[in-house]
Amino acid sequence: MASPANSINTHMTMRLWALLGLLGLIWGGSFFFARVAVAHVPPFTLVLLRLGLAALALHLYLRGRHGIYPALAERWREFLLMGLINNAIPHAFIFLGQTHIGAGLAAILNATTPVWTVLIANVATEDEKLSTAKFSGCLLGLAGTVVLIGPSALAGLFGAAGDVPLWALVLPVLAAVSYGFSASYGKRFRNLAAPVTAAGQLTASTLIMLPVAVLVDMPWTLPMPPLTTVLAILGLALVSTAYAYILFFRIMAEAGATNTSLVTLLVPPSAILLGYLFLGEILQATDIGGMLLIAVGLAILDGRVLKLGYSAGR
């Protein structure tokens, strides 16, 4: 998944910032598309459609190049596990959560992914141990998550009937944890071309979700969804998954993983804006507070804020 070091430019040009902003808007759009589609399509079937259409699109894009088929044959077990923890589980959890929460809140909760990635990497790897800055960033990110989930959890403890069930808030966080595991596991695919890794894991996760959707949702019994839902599914699969992967790896090849990870800060505002403009979603004060805590935590994890402050003070 990583790109050759000699192709990485750590200086962010205006073009790269524009591409990063576009990616943030596209991934923010995935929560918007999902919120529209999940009203008419069950979550497991929606995951299957998203992954299956995206996998097909990437196979058409690759057209057998970069050794995609030998890689699938030789490493299918690894692709299955990667597809499970990087696609099937997190997407299913997010879509299930979005049956009760809006696009903006789901995006904010999922923005804790880098926090869990750092914590998991500290245990699972030898070269990514916690530093003081990373630990502080993790604490702030986790505090933001508590602020977001806290009111619902307290309502459940005291028997109050909250507007949002606790499980709908917890599932996107568990999706972020799953993404954290996939970030560490994904290092083993460094020797493959990025589109091959993307197509391989999407193909595997499609095979995982097929029996789940068939057994649980029985999609052949579902009524034909309206045109808006069909368009949302196509946008989710082709734009927010297939094209987003290509764009993501293109930015990573030029800007490096650290610069590319800044997209995490751009996704929630994009999802919130789309939800507000088209779905009439309004966030509570605790939602905004939680997002700010997570954003500050991610900025500390990234490290550049501290470096800029140090440089300015000299």
Image: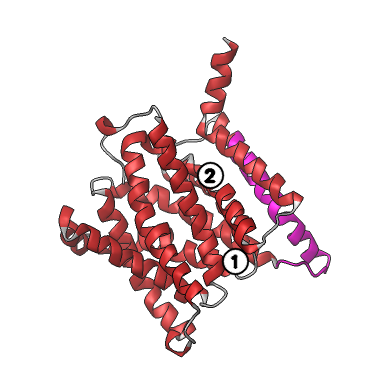
Q: Residue at x 65, y 50 (%)?
A: 145
Residue 137: x and y in percent read 59, 36
- Provide residue 198's location: percent of width, then percent of height: 31, 56
| Local crowd size for mark 2, using a 10 Å CA cut-off: few (<14), some (14–19), many (≥20) | many
Q: Main secondary structure of the magenta part?
A: helix
Q: Residue furthest top?
A: 314
Camera-side residue: 265 or 277? 277
Q: Nearer the viewer, mark 1 or mark 2?
A: 2
- Indicate the quadrant containing the C terminus: top left, top right, bottom left or bottom right: top right
Q: Secondary structure at mark 2?
A: helix
Q: Quadrant of residue 5?
A: top left
Question: Looking at this rendering, what residue extends furthest in the bottom direction?
Answer: 221
Q: Mark 1 and 2 residues: CB-CB less than 8 Å, in contact?
A: no
Residue 125 placement, left or right of 159:
left
Q: Which residue is mark 1?
A: 97
Q: Which residues are magenta?
A: 136-164
Q: Is residue 26 magenta?
A: no
- Tell me if I can see residue 111 in this picture: no
Labelled disc at residue 266 = 2
Amino acid type at image mark 2 = Leu
